[in-house]
Amino acid sequence: MFPFSDASVHHRTFPYVNSALIGISVLVFIYEMVLGGLSTLTGGGGLDLNIFFFKWGFIAKELTAGMPFEGLSTVSGPVDIETPVHTVFTIFSSMFIHGGFMHLAGNMMFLWVFGDNLEDRFGHLKYLVFYLVAGVAATLSQWVINTDSQVPLIGASGAISGVLGAYLLIYPNNKVKALIIVFLITVVEMRAMWLLGAWFVWQLIQGSMSIGLSDSVSVAFFAHIGGFVAGMVLAGAYKLAIGESLNPRETKVQPWDRWYQAGRGRD
């Protein structure tokens, strides 16, 4: 499933933070290509890129043991993989690293479609804090499932799952267009509650099947699950803090419509 657009929402501001998050991820991937060459596009890359992943990706065993890995044995001898900063920092750095072009493109497409509305709703700084907190929650959710994993965890999908969870709670009735590829390529349009709800159920199914096999599965399903739940919880707390009902049926006029009708939502 590849969402590529959602219903138009009147934005008060340009999504500077969301655009910056995408831009940083793209720049990091370009650096990965410098290290690994064109094979990075398909998930390859060689030793230099693997060292980069070990240094800046999140490794559960490092957090569990309270000490970083210092060396990696290779056919050419040991190489240094010690992270220059504390292991906790890699929870954040890992959010901007991707393991191939499709990994990057898929994540950035989700972020592009769903993130701008949330940034407009929360405000720039609150959205940035929300994104990082959701990413931390996602990473720790995967860590809890496999505390002894020595495989670097990379990718923005955990934080982006938080964006999806918040979007589901705040814009459940907004219509989203997505490209579905199974046996045929089909474009569907449906309400966010159904599209994102189905996505979350699929993560639960896949996650339950991966229990005990975490290191042999290339997708961190519990990071997706944890991030999604964290996003819903944070969005729910935000709505309650501003005195808004959690039930979308009780909101006769959408928040962005109130702003727009007041003459302050025009670009």
Image: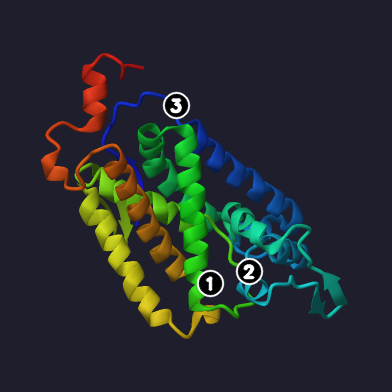
Task: Count numbered badges in the picture.
Answer: 3
1 or 2: mark nearer the eye: 1
Q: Identify the mark at residue 143; answer none if there is no mark.
A: 1
What is the three-letter code of the residue carrying label 2?
Pro
Q: Position of residue 111 (x, y in %)?
A: 44, 46
Is residue 10 toward the left or the right of residue 106 in the image?
A: left
Residue extending furthest bottom?
212
- Quadrant containing the C terminus in the rendered view: top left
Query: What is the x, y in percent for residue 37?
Result: 72, 56
Q: Earlier in the sequence, mark 1 or mark 3?
A: 3
Mark 1 to mark 3: distance in Å?
35 Å
**Percent position (x, y) of residue 245?**
19, 43
For disc 2, the marked residue is 152
Q: Can you see residue 108?
A: no
Quarter of the figure with the N terminus: bottom left
* Rendering quarter of residue 63: bottom right
Q: Which residue is mark 3?
A: 14
Query: What secondary structure is found at the residue carrying circle 3?
Result: loop
